[in-house]
Structure formats: structure tokens, C-alpha cells
Image (cartoon, rainbow, N blue to C red):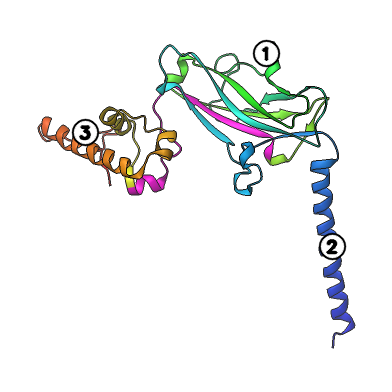
Amino acid sequence: MLTNKKMKRILLLIFLFSGLLNACKQDEYYIYNDEKRIQFGPQPNRIYTATYNMADTLKMQNFFYKDASIVKDTVYFDIYAIGGVESFDRQFVLEQEEYPHMENAVAGVHYVPFNDPGIQKHYMMKADSVHAVVPIFLIRDQSLANKTVSLKFKLKENDFFKLGERTKLFRRLEITDRLTRPSAWTDSYSQYYYGTYSVVKHEFMIEVTGEKWDSEFIENVDPSLQQYYLAEIKKELIKYKNDNGGDPLLDENGVEVTFP
């Protein structure tokens, strides 16, 4: 039989749990139904899949693989209006947030400023719509040949939109014009397929196969084709060593280029 003391504890726990549930419901109501709000999100076909909630938070744009004549490029992100549609177009506002102690992108140098009058028509939630694609207009500045810059941008409240969920108010771009380790070249890929990343190794792989070995290629290459390419690369490494009197190919750090 429960004592009065135990009963009070159980009632207290029930009260606290009920309060937590109500707080969650109120917060959810606040986020989605209280006012017109805006936030980033995944692609529309992934929006109801929880594992993709934070997809595309970080993207990499590398001009290295593009023809030298291309001096500008565009990267796209998905954005959503919360709280229903309107019968008119609604402007949304982006602004840069700089990282401390990092090489930040410079407006007008590495990207077209978000307040540039010429691009405002692209930062619009169209009438009768709750989804839009946000273009970020990048500039191929010469400085990118020697460094990678970070562009973190976030949504800013305006007359049309309050802000949505805190974790979905920003996105980030890494911009460069030099060969760098693709995000898909993970530690797992290093361990089982490619070995330690180096620029020299990456260049050699491109030279032998004619493929970019960027994230898009790594994520989509057929496994059997990948194995074929790696076998060819290893053969060419042996040939390089034989053609150079037994001296192996060394990377930019003076370490021999090898594969698992």
C-alpha cells in the first residue's frame, strides 16, 4: 500500500511531467502557428525525414574544377515559410555572421552582398508558396587560389517574417579555388580506400583517371568502377617509382603517396 509520502512524490512527478509536455506543446505552437516565420530546411522531398533536418547546413564550393573562364557561380539552399501562405510576394533578409579567428568571406570580393539591389528579387517567398530556393552568388576572386574562406549567413527578421527554429536560421559555405580534401573523403574512406589525403595524391588520382574525385564523384561512383580506378592508380604509382630510379612519389609534406 502506498504511504501518503510516496503518493505525494508520485503526484509531484506527474505534475512536473505534465508541465513539461505542456511546455513542449506551447513551444511547438509558438514555432509553427503563432506568427509568420521563416527558416532553412532540407530539400522538399526530404522535409518529413527527421534525419535530414540539418541537411545542407554546410556546403563546399570549389572553383578549381571549373574552367578558368568561369568567374562567378551560384550555390542554392532551401528555405521555408512557417504559418501558411499569403496572396502576395514576401521579402526575406539574409546577413553575414563572421566567425572569430577564421578567414571570413568578404562581401563584394568573394560573394555578391546580400543587400545588393540587383539580387533582391531572388530573396522572395512567392505568393501562395511556402518554399523557395535561395541563391548565393559567388565571385571567383584571385585570393581563393591560396586560401579557403567561410561564409556563414543567417536569416534576419523583417516586416514579413519573424524567425523560425533557432537551429535552422543559418547556413555556411566554404569557398576556395584550390584542390582540397572533399567532404566525402571521410576518415572511413581514408582507412579502407584512399589512404591519407594530400593534394599531390589527389592530383595524381585526377591525372590517372580523368575524374575529379570530388564529393559528388565519391558519393556516386559505382563500387566496382572505384575498385578498377584504384587498381589503375596503384599500378601507375609503381610505374612512377620505376621510371624515377626507385624514388617514390612524395606528397607536399615529403611523405610517400600510398593507398591501403
Residue 76 position, x and y percent, is: 59, 27
Say whether residue 33 is left or right of residue 126: right
Q: Are marks 2 and 3 in contact (CB under 8 Å)?
A: no
- Disc on the earlier residue, 2 or 1: 2
Residue 73 position, x and y percent, is: 52, 18
Q: Is residue 120 above or below residue 62?
A: above
Q: Which residue sits at x=69%, y=25%?
A: 94
- Mark 1 — residue? 116
- Disc on the earlier residue, 1 or 3: 1
Q: Secondary structure at mark 2?
A: helix
- Mark 3 — residue? 249
Residue 219 position, x and y percent, is: 43, 39
- Mark 2 — residue? 18
Gap between marks 2 and 1 measured at Cα: 49 Å
Query: What span is in magenta?
Result: 168-192
Is residue 77 visible from the viewing direction of this image? yes
Closer to the camera: disc 2 or disc 3? 2
The answer to whether residue 35 is magenta is: no
Q: Secondary structure at mark 3?
A: loop
Q: Is residue 125 above or below residue 140?
A: below
Q: Secondary structure at mark 1?
A: loop
Identified by mark 1, the residue type is Asp
Mark sitting on residue 222:
none
